[in-house]
Image: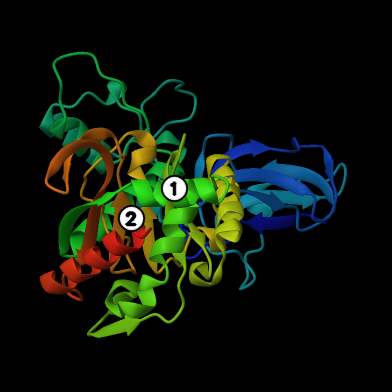
């Protein structure tokens, strides 16, 4: 008996996933709960197991194709069994239908190489003077959308260009950054702190990850300054009584924030182990959804990639983020004398709906005191 399997919502608010690769081909056997297909969501790369044992009769998409939640992902049945889409149940047990008739692509079968676009999209392209043949569609099955045409018109270039669709991870980063900038009124305050004491503490501890030492210094401050461990919810301010610190990780797939749970209660050694584990998993896209969400405060060590000052964007659902820049040697004044020293550049962005400027400077002063403590 053929069993249809539709793409489930495997993440909070997931709307689509991109197929990376199939572990079995059509006609091959697969066991119950064996990995069937690898997909990339806006959170991570995950394996989806087979819900039934049998033979794979149908693949709902090819590698590189993006499919919507609840659309048909696979069909598993018996060896030698025939399955056609028309055979899907037509009663109330039928799977949810994705899309409508007026969204169907206007491509005539038997005309290979024809551009996939709806008539209204073709009309828009003609109006804007955009050549459809040069576009890479971002719609289902590579169909060119109105957004594709408008973007091409807005970014028209007289020279050679290359247009590459965003990966699911990059789209998620773009969406999250745009939402933060759109909804949170940002204020950024800056400071510097002598790097010597913190680097000396790190050496004395056996050189754990710098992020671990920074988190150990900053996490205890969050209980003393609750506005920096909070979020706006409608007309309320939610003060969080748990201290889960997000650490920004630069990966080949883009910037990701991994979350150190209960950071204020961990020792430096425990933080070192957790920071290294999360960073490695992030770079391999192996973080779980729970490890990618829920931070109450974020620290970004931009010094690791050569950064100094910046304007970090406050992650949605939090009230603040601290970036720590690279501590290069430079002339500084100490005890009325010019000496060569190293200072960490600090950039603290916060939600001005929750935090006033004076509170921002107060917290920055506390950060400087904690990082610069002997």
Disc nearer the start of the sequence (2/1): 2
Q: Residue drawn 13% across and 26% down?
A: 129
Q: Is residue 11 left or right of residue 248?
A: right
Residue 89 percent location from the top left of the image: 66, 63
Q: Is residue 162 left or right of residue 207?
A: left
Q: Residue drawn 46% across and 21% down?
A: 112
Q: Is residue 24 left or right of residue 131?
A: right
Circle 1 packing at 10 Å, graded few (<14), some (14-19), many (20+), is few
Dividing the picture into quadrants, the one containing residue 280 is top right
124 vs 180, nearest the viewer: 180
Circle 2 packing at 10 Å, graded few (<14), some (14-19), many (20+), is some
Residue 212 percent location from the top left of the image: 49, 54
Q: Is residue 1 left or right of residue 315?
A: right
Residue 126 percent location from the top left of the image: 16, 30
Q: Is residue 196 above or below residue 295?
A: above
Alpha carbon of mark 2 to alpha carbon of mark 1: how far?
37 Å
11 vs 343, nearest the viewer: 343
Q: Is residue 106 above or below residue 42?
A: above
Callout 1 secondary element: helix
Mark linked to residue 200: 1
Callout 2 secondary element: helix
Q: Is residue 307 above or below residue 178?
A: above
Residue 264 seen from this side: yes
Mark linked to residue 280: none
Question: What residue is pinned by disc 2?
Answer: 176
Residue 184 percent location from the top left of the image: 20, 65
């Amino acid at each position: 008996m053929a069993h249809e399997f539709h793409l489930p919502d495997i993440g909070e608010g997931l709307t689509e996933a991109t197929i990376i690769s199939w572990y079995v081909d059509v006609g091959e056997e697969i066991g119950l709960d064996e990995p069937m297909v690898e997909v990339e969501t806006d959170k991570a790369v995950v394996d989806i197991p087979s819900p039934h044992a049998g033979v794979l009769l149908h693949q709902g998409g090819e590698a590189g194709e993006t499919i919507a939640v609840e659309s048909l992902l696979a069909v598993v049945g018996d060896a030698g069994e025939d399955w056609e889409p028309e055979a899907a149940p037509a009663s109330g047990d039928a799977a949810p239908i994705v899309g409508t008739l007026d969204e169907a692509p206007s491509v005539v079968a038997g005309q290979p190489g024809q551009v996939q676009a709806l008539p209204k999209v073709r009309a828009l392209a003609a109006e804007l003077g955009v050549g459809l043949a040069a576009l890479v569609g971002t719609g289902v099955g590579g169909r060119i959308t109105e957004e594709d045409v408008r973007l091409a018109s807005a970014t028209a270039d007289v020279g050679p260009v290359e247009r590459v669709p965003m990966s699911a991870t990059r789209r998620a980063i773009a969406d999250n950054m745009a939402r933060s900038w759109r909804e949170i009124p940002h204020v950024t305050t800056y400071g510097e702190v002598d790097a010597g004491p913190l680097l000396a503490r790190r050496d004395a501890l056996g050189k754990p990850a710098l992020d671990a030492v920074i988190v150990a210094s900053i996490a205890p401050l969050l209980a003393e300054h609750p506005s920096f461990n909070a979020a706006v919810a409608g007309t309320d301010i939610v003060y969080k009584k748990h201290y889960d610190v997000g650490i920004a990780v630069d990966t080949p797939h883009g910037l990701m924030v991994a979350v150190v749970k209960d950071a204020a209660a961990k020792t430096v050694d425990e933080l070192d182990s957790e920071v290294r584990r999360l960073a490695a998993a992030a770079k391999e896209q192996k973080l779980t959804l729970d490890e990618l969400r829920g931070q109450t405060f974020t620290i970004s060590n931009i010094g690791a990639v050569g950064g100094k000052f910046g304007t970090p964007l406050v992650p949605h659902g939090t009230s603040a983020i601290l970036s720590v820049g690279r501590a290069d040697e430079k002339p500084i004044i100490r005890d009325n004398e010019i000496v060569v020293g190293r200072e960490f550049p600090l950039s603290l962005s916060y939600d001005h709906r929750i935090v006033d400027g004076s509170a921002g400077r107060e917290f920055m002063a506390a950060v400087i005191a904690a990082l610069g403590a002997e």
